[in-house]
Structure formats: structure tokens, C-alpha cells
Amino acid sequence: LVAGFARTYGGWIANHIALVFIEVIRGTPIVVQVMFIYFALPMAFTDLRIDPFTAAVVTIMINSGAYIAEITRGAVLSIHNGFREAGLALGLSRRETIRYVIMPLALRRMLPPLGNQWIISIKDTSLFIVIGVAELTRQGQEIIAGNFRALEIWSAVAVIYLIITLVLSFVLRRLERRMKIL
């Protein structure tokens, strides 16, 4: 959200710093990002030790943050300027107008793309197998190594991911209906 607000309301410097961050993250694959955090950062900073789980969490936060920043910016910019003017005309400060008028409306518009981003992030966790994170895909690999039943195990892994994403989709659809997206 910070980068999204920097892109929307920040000055020239904040806007461009956020823009560079967003473009670098969106322009590189998440596998490269996790490899950089897990392998390259400890090489650059010799006292730094990062375990695979921490590298995975930091990577997913940074990666999602870049996309969520653009979702935030798009939602805020989609709110008609008249709402801002109305808030200011009622005597609200710029900050209060953003907090009490613009953001509640923008949040409603952000919800569907945020839901998509959360689902993508859940599925992206499977890529962290490259640094040895014992997530669902890794567990499937280890079971296959023991019993050689790839079809059944990969099918089970796919069904588990599907259940997780379907539950999240269902919850988000209910929330969208409840908030009555504008």
C-alpha cells in the first residue's frame, strides 16, 4: 500500500522510487527474486543468514507488494474527482478526505484484483521448492520419491491447491456481494 500511495499521492521523488521498485519486481520472475534473496544477499552481506522459509516469505511479500501497489493506485485513481472535492468542501482535510471518502470507495474496487493477487501468491508458493522450502509441492515430491506414485500424488497436490483457492474465491465473492462493488 505504501508504494501505491507513493505512486498516487507522493511527490516526484517518492513516485519515481516506487515506480522503479514496482517495475523491477514486476519485470523479474519470482524464482529469480527468491534466488536473489536467498543466495545473493548473503553473499553481498557476509553477516546475513537467511533461512529458506524467511526468504520465501520476504519474496512473496515484496512480489505481491509491487502488484498490490498498482492495484491500489488504479483503484484510487478510478474514484471520480468529485468525491475528493466533496470531502474538501465539507471541511475535511486532504488526509481525512483520502481516509474517509476515497479509500472506502477504492477498497471496494480493489477487492476483486486483490483477491486475484492473493490467489496468485498462494500458487506462487509452489515455486519456492527451488530453495528447499518444504511447502506442498516439495512434500509431494518427497512422497513420490518414496512410493513412485506420481499421478496420484500430483493429482492430490493439485486438488489441495484447488480447494484452497476455491475457498478463498468463495469468501471473496461473498465479501464483494456484501460490499456491493460500485
Image (cartoon, rainbow, N blue to C red):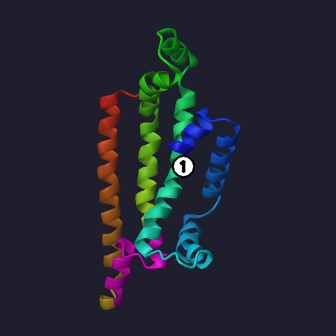
Q: Quadrant of residue 165 in the image? A: bottom left
From this view, report whether residue 15 is shown above or below residue 135: above
Residue 113 is situated, as x and y percent measured from the top left of the image, at 47, 42
Residues rendered magenta in the picture: 127-145
Q: Which of 86/129 is in front?
A: 86
On whether residue 128 falls in the magenta region, the answer is yes
User: Residue sitting at 55 percent across and 64 percent down?
Assistant: 30
Amino acid type shown at disc 1: Tyr
Q: Quadrant of residue 44 in the image? A: bottom right
User: Residue sitting at 35 percent across and 34 percent down?
Assistant: 176
Residue 105 is situated, as x and y percent measured from the top left of the image, at 44, 26
Q: Which of 21/124 is in front?
A: 21
Residue 51 is situated, as x and y percent measured from the top left of the image, at 43, 76
Residue occupied by mark 1: 67
Q: Which residue lies furthest to the top in this view?
A: 89
Q: Tell me how many marks there are.
A: 1
